[in-house]
Amino acid sequence: MINIKKLNPNLIKAQYAVRGKIVQRAYELEQEGKKIIYCNIGNPQALKQKPLTYVRQLLALCEYPKLIEDQKTKALFHKDVIEKVQRILAENPNGLGAYTQSEGMIFIRKAVSRFISERDGIESDPTKIILTDGASKGIQSVFTLLLNNPNSGFMIPIPQYPLYSATIELYGAKQINYYLDEEKHWELNKEELESSIDEAKKKGIEPVAIVVINPGNPTGSVLSKENIKMIISFAQKHNLSILADEVYQENIYSDHHKFHSFAKVMDEMKVTDVSLFSFHSTSKGFLGECGHRGGYFETKNVDSEVYSQLIKLQSIGLCSNTAGQIVTYAMVNPPQKHEDSYETYMKEKNSILGELKKKAEILGEELNKIKGMSLKFPYGAMYAFVKIDLPQEKNIRNMSKKEIAEYESKRDFNYCLELLEETGICVVPGSGFGQKPHTYHFRTTFLPPADEIKELVKKLKKFHENYLKNLSKN
């Protein structure tokens, strides 16, 4: 019989904190009857966000076209949705139960291309767009493409979304950390980038790409155009590909911040010698369709031979799921002003984004009032990366770097575990995302309803004050 010693060691080493031990404990407590506020993962509809009527009507008729023939359908479904479904079925007569082209349905890729062109005011080539099972699968495909030997290194932000560190570990690649500047609202710092890549090269690592998450996860940051220009120039200097994780591009909560795509900024800079892979997903934004696993990535400055390898890789998995492709189509092809479903769509969209903004403001204002807790206001995405002050319990001067890291990760893990046990609030320790040595954080979403967010803040305050008192007694 197989045992753990016979498994792939890379799999055993890979960690994915947002569904780790604390979350497993939360499930156990819930089974015992304890109320849990799940703030560990960006899963909007699991936290009471309602699906958009437009998306679900489109899916329902695509999945069961016979409904179109029923007279009752005209009363239940918007006219423009019925017409769109008829066009979809004409483009894809085999229905959602059949495989599509490996890259995805061409009419949907054309719709994605139009969406990008209208968003950025630049040209987009539909034949350089691939539909994927969420952004995650696309990101893993590009990692597979670029990993040409065991010393291939990927620069990832710290803190980062654990998909990246887990994929690097799983694929046997090398992780190159660069720290985001918390004091400057989590911007990228040129000196830090240069220092981290130089250090990697000294270790024999061969850097091949830099990952940038904008808006930020777990930080809630929104990068300025100038910061993006600096990153592109850095990638150009060091011959790096850029992986632009832009899945939260609709989630902007500050009137003073704007989403700038890497594709648009690169076009403005007239840079043509840096390969760019840009990712988007139906899971985030205001759609929140995590379970349908829809998404895409667009390639820029990638030659045809390289792109053909991506298609081959996609074909090994046959194609992305067709329902997810339809949701992607809905995301990039929303109702227009003259269409029946427009009013409902805009009302639901604005309600979701308005609620998210309100909840971001609650966290941004209230958590900073708690002594020993601080937060850079989340301008985007759907997360807050909260800094907590924990006095040192041990003299760490004589510890190795590895021992210090293990000690500090246990501390924020224990903090989050006790928070869960005592209050029912499920968050993820900062060590699961990475953080500067001698600092402690946790990531929370602000997806639960506003009344639960207010309750969360009160519980956090009481817990944190008691936790620090108990530490001082010990």
Image: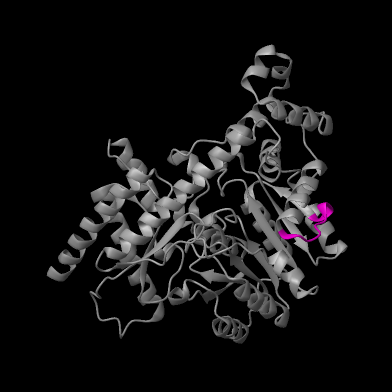
Q: Is residue 147 visible?
A: no
Instruction: Tell me what residue is drawn at x 82 percent, y 43 percent.
Output: 106
Quadrant in the rendering for residue 427: bottom left
* Residue 274 x, y percent position in the rendering: 76, 73
13 with respect to 197 (left or right): left
Front one among 355 and 279: 355
Q: Is residue 258 visible?
A: yes
Front one among 15 and 427: 427
Please state the extent of the stretch shown in magenta in the rendering: 120-128
Image quadrant holding the C terminus, namely: bottom left
Quadrant in the rendering for residue 163: bottom right
* Residue 294 x, y percent position in the rendering: 65, 44
| Rendered view: 22 above or below 228 | above
* Residue 99 x, y percent position in the rendering: 77, 36
468 with respect to 130 (left or right): left
| Rendered view: 422 above or below 392 | above
Quadrant in the rendering for residue 92: top right
